Image: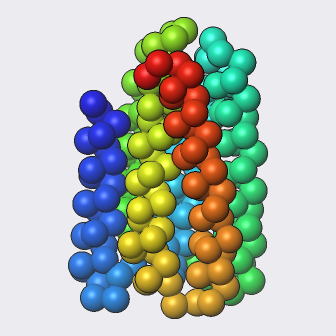
Amino acid sequence: MRTKSFLAALLASTALVAAHAQQGPSDPQIAHIVVTANQVDIDAGKLAEKKSSSADVRKFGKQMVTDHTAVNKQATDLVKKLKVTPEANDTSASLKKGGDENLAKLGKLKGKAFDKAYVEHEVAYHQAVIDAVDKTLLPSAKNADLKALLEKVRPALVQHLEHAKHLQSELGA
């Protein structure tokens, strides 16, 4: 239930950023959103690697850490190349807050309860991130390299979503 309210807040804050700046978030804001969104999933994945009772969920958590760390490296390299400083904004702050709340919730769970909650969050989180990429970030990105990075990572997000849904069905969540 909390995951859904967090994701609703994520989508609402993304819409607010877009509405606030008529053309949507700026490229520096998008860069900050991308790095924050990836870090949220890295942190949750690390927790899954440590706490999960399921080998498949631990493996998925490790994949999230690996894949999202790689995307953050690409994003960091790009902003350095472009000499752009990522700009904190309401969306990135909302992502960070929601990620911290999720970690606190997951930290109290054990066994199957942890696995189900983690995977449920991963399904909802990846869907929300894909929606944000499609509806706000890609349409708002002005820099061709930034837009290309978003387009390049989108298929991996879809793959993560499908993998999480598969795990969800296996866990009976």
- Of 94 and 19, the residue lying toward us: 19
| In the depicted structure, whether residue 137 falls above or below residue 22 | above
User: Who's the residue at 66% across and 33% down the image?
Assistant: 61
**Is 110 situated left or right of 144 in this image?**
left
* Quadrant in which residue 77 is drawn: bottom right
Query: Looking at the rendering, in which quadrant would you find the C terminus?
Result: top left
Q: Position of residue 101 (x, y in %)?
A: 38, 34
**Is 66 situated left or right of 19 in this image?**
right
Q: Residue furthest top?
A: 111
User: Who's the residue at 52% across and 56% down the image?
Assistant: 36
* Quadrant in which residue 55 is drawn: top right
Residue 171, visible in the rendered structure: yes
| In the depicted structure, whether residue 123 falls above or below residue 48 | below
| In the depicted structure, whether residue 66 falls above or below residue 47 | below
Q: Position of residue 16 (x, y in %)?
A: 25, 70
- Of 114 and 75, the residue lying toward us: 114
**Is 55 situated left or right of 147 in this image?**
right
Residue 107, visible in the rendered structure: no
Q: Position of residue 109 (x, y in %)?
A: 46, 14
Colour option used: rainbow
* Quadrant in which residue 71 is drawn: bottom right
Query: Looking at the rendering, in which quadrant would you find the N terminus?
Result: top left
User: Who's the residue at 38% across and 67% down the image?
Assistant: 89
Q: Position of residue 118 (x, y in %)?
A: 50, 28
| In the depicted structure, whether residue 135 falls above or below residue 24 | above
- Of 65 and 56, the residue lying toward us: 56
User: Who's the residue at 54% across and 9% down the image?
Assistant: 111
**Badge count:** 0
